[in-house]
């Protein structure tokens, strides 16, 4: 039997913008489930993984013989008294979990390695057994935090987008390397203003850039966004086939900024669906009506995650 089984509450939406999505929780269970005493003693080290929102416990009792017994089996011929659990209850009451509370959506079963420190030394930890296992789970639990961490550590040359800060414009003031699209019933303006991509008085339009990708690859994306006046601004990630036809529409990602003044940062993680050959980044706005309605985008980043 292979080692790990992870059932992550799967959702195709790994996105954040306005309202941060709820953080998914995983619970650890398996042969290394701790006794109450070990739970208390090793709790800080366990929580350092930053992966789990809880754990199962292996109940332990101490009988009149003074020996601690593992009593995780539901069916047993052993006799026990309620008082055998006094010590275990005291350990649990004394434990002060900060993140490993009992709330969870999914669980992971560890059979050949361990998450709980302080166990048998001959068994490795999961990140030793499967390098990157902890980071993969962190991405599943909180994709936005994981994307932010990856973008923070990325170098400027890792950004796959050209002219990402809108520093280069042509003689008409349009951002180089970014194409524009506007619905034919929409009559807004595309410009670069103060080094940002600007859309004004636009019923429906966007700046865009198309990047070749392969199915299964993962990318972190971020953009700064500011809105003045009316309209709905949005950063979207969409997909095209190798032949440049739109595809996988149900896996489009759309991020809208929070309803607050000033610049907001939108961040998400995406995985390239099957059949896709191009990732399309769209910086768009809709429902602008007045001459002072303005949407600005700047510092757009698209970085491939290679682990
Ligand atoms: Ca800029």
Image (spheres, rainbow, N blue to C red):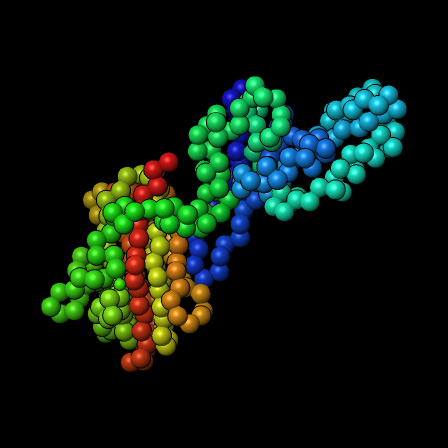
Front position in the image: 16 or 122: 122
**Image position of 48 (left or right of 131):** right
Residue under the image location 29 percent in, 80 percent down? 291
Residue under the image location 48 percent in, 30 percent down? 127
**Image position of 252 (left or right of 191):** right
Front position in the image: 174 or 87: 87
Residue under the image location 59 percent in, 37 percent down? 45
Q: Quadrant of the N terminus?
A: top right
Residue 125 in sight in this render = yes
Front position in the image: 260 or 247: 260
Residue under the image location 43 percent in, 59 percent down? 17
Q: Is residue 258 above or below residue 304?
A: below
**Percent position of residue 77, x then y:** 83, 19
Give the image quarter of residue 78: top right
**Percent position of residue 128, x then y:** 48, 27
Q: How many marks?
A: 0
**Image position of 250 (left or right of 195):** right
Q: If the picture is divided into quarters, which one holds ligand 1?
A: bottom left
Q: Is residue 221 above or below residue 138?
A: below
**Percent position of residue 237, x then y:** 33, 53
């Amino acid at each position: 039997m292979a080692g790990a089984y992870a059932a992550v509450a799967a959702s195709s939406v790994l996105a954040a913008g306005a309202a941060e999505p709820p953080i998914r929780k995983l619970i650890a269970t398996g042969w290394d489930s701790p006794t109450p005493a070990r739970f208390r003693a090793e709790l800080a080290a366990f929580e350092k993984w930053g992966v789990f929102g809880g754990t199962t416990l292996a109940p332990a009792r101490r009988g009149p013989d003074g020996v601690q017994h593992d009593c995780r089996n539901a069916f047993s011929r052993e006799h026990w008294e309620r008082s055998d659990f006094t010590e275990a209850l005291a350990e649990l009451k004394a434990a002060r979990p900060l993140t490993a509370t009992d709330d969870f959506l999914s669980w992971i079963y560890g059979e050949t390695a361990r998450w709980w420190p302080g166990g048998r030394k001959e068994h490795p930890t999961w990140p030793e057994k499967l390098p990157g296992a902890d980071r993969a789970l962190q991405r599943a639990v909180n994709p936005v935090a994981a994307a932010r961490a990856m973008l923070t550590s990325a170098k400027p040359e890792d950004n796959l987008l050209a002219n990402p800060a809108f520093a280069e414009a042509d003689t008409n003031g349009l951002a180089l390397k970014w194409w524009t699209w506007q619905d034919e019933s929409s009559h807004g303006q595309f410009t670069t203003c103060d080094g940002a991509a600007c859309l004004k008085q636009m019923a429906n339009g966007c700046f865009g850039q198309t990047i070749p990708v392969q199915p299964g690859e993962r990318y972190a994306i971020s953009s700064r966004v500011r809105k003045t006046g009316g309209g709905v601004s949005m950063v979207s990630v969409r997909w095209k086939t190798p032949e440049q036809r739109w595809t996988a529409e149900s896996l489009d990602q759309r991020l809208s900024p929070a309803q607050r003044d000033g610049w907001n940062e939108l961040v998400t993680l995406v995985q390239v669906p099957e059949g896709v050959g191009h990732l399309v980044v769209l910086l768009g706005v809709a429902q602008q009506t007045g001459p002072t309605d303005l949407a600005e985008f700047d510092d757009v980043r698209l970085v491939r995650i290679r682990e």
